[in-house]
Amino acid sequence: MKNKKIILYIFLVSIICIIVSFLSVGITKLYFSINGDTDYKKLGLEIDEYDIEYCTIYTEDFLDGKYKVYKLKNYYTNSMENFKNQLEDSNLWDKNKYYEYIMKEFSEIKDDSLIPIDREDLYYYNGKNAYAIFDLKNAKLYYYINRIFNHHVDYPKDLDLDIRDYINREIYDVRGGPQNDGRDYYVYKFTEERGKDIIEELEQNKKWSKNKIEEDKLEYFEYNKEVFDIKNGYFYYGLVCRTRDVNEKKNVTKENATGYEIGIYDIDNNILYYCWESI
């Protein structure tokens, strides 16, 4: 009888421990979902709270955006292999790096010094809401979102072209100032299927031509010298006027022009290059 009581006691204690463990895990997950950092969950990977060893927040400001570095747990031999398989299977990640303009935003700070990231084994996120880099070698995830770069919605409507359905977009400059001066400089990448629709639109658009524009105008694309090598494309060049006079905006002449805009669509690679500048 005494042995039965001991066995029953051990059984009840075990059940209680299991219940407490489940409750603890549930409460912890609930806490992190409410109060914890969950930006890494937006990147299309199966990352759990317990996969994060720690997170270093460099910038988390409403206006400037966010910049964080997550250190991932790598205690088991297959941890990074599992993530590598996810990265390979995801259409949101690939090995094509960002332009150097964006790459320079990724670094770590140690003793007040900027340390560039290790570029040996990286995957790059191609979603529309953030820049992210997964470092398999060092088990780190870099997350960067800037209000200007990632939430700029002033699409080049003057091109009479619907370009919202892009794969990814690079932004080099945006205009600003009291008179809206400056430069808009974008590079848009499209799927092959979407590219066919764009080509059909351009064929009907009288603003665009297959005749390549002068090379001195191509110099405006200072970060994308590949535009000089485009063999099959559509090209557009026009004058712009930033005045508030609606009539002058529609009837731009050399006399009232304050700048220019250039559009180049690379048929072979489904890429649109766009530059608008006013001074």
Image: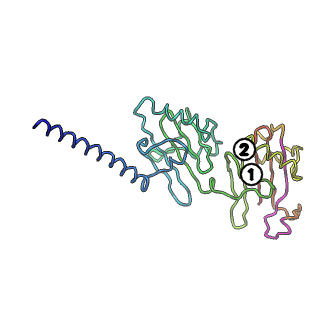
SS for tag 2?
loop
**Which comes sooner in the sequence, label 2 or label 1?**
1
Q: Which mark is residue 237?
A: none
SS for tag 1?
loop
Residue at coordinates 57% horizontally, 37% vertically from top-left? Answer: 123
Asked whether 17 or 3 is in front, the reply is: 3
Q: Amino acid at mark 2?
A: Phe
Instruction: Where is residue 124? Give x, y as percent.
Output: 59, 40
Q: Residues within 10 Å of mark 1 (few under 14, many from 20)?
A: some
Look at the numbered discs 2 and 1 and tell me whether their residues touch, using CB distance below 8 Å.
yes
Does the magenta-highlighted stretch encompass residue 240? yes
Asked whether 11 or 88 is in front, the reply is: 11
Is residue 107 toward the left or the right of residue 213 in the image?
left
Instruction: Where is residue 9? Give x, y as percent.
Output: 17, 41
Q: Which mark is residue 163?
A: 1
Instruction: Where is residue 242? Give x, y as percent.
Output: 78, 64
Question: What range of the chain is rendered magenta?
Answer: 233-249
Instruction: Where is residue 274? Give x, y as percent.
Output: 76, 50
Vertical order, 30 against 248 (above or below): above
Query: Which of the 4 image quarters holds residue 241?
Result: bottom right
Is residue 171 toward the left or the right of residue 218 in the image?
left
Does the magenta-highlighted stretch encompass residue 190? no
Quadrant for the C terminus in the image: bottom right
Asked whether 90 or 75 is in front, the reply is: 90
User: For the view shown, which residue lies furthest in the bottom direction?
Assistant: 245
Quadrant for the N terminus in the image: top left
Q: Which residue is denoted by mark 2 in the rendering?
A: 190
Q: Amino acid at mark 1?
A: Ile
- Per the model, the C-alpha gap separating discs 2 and 1 is 9 Å
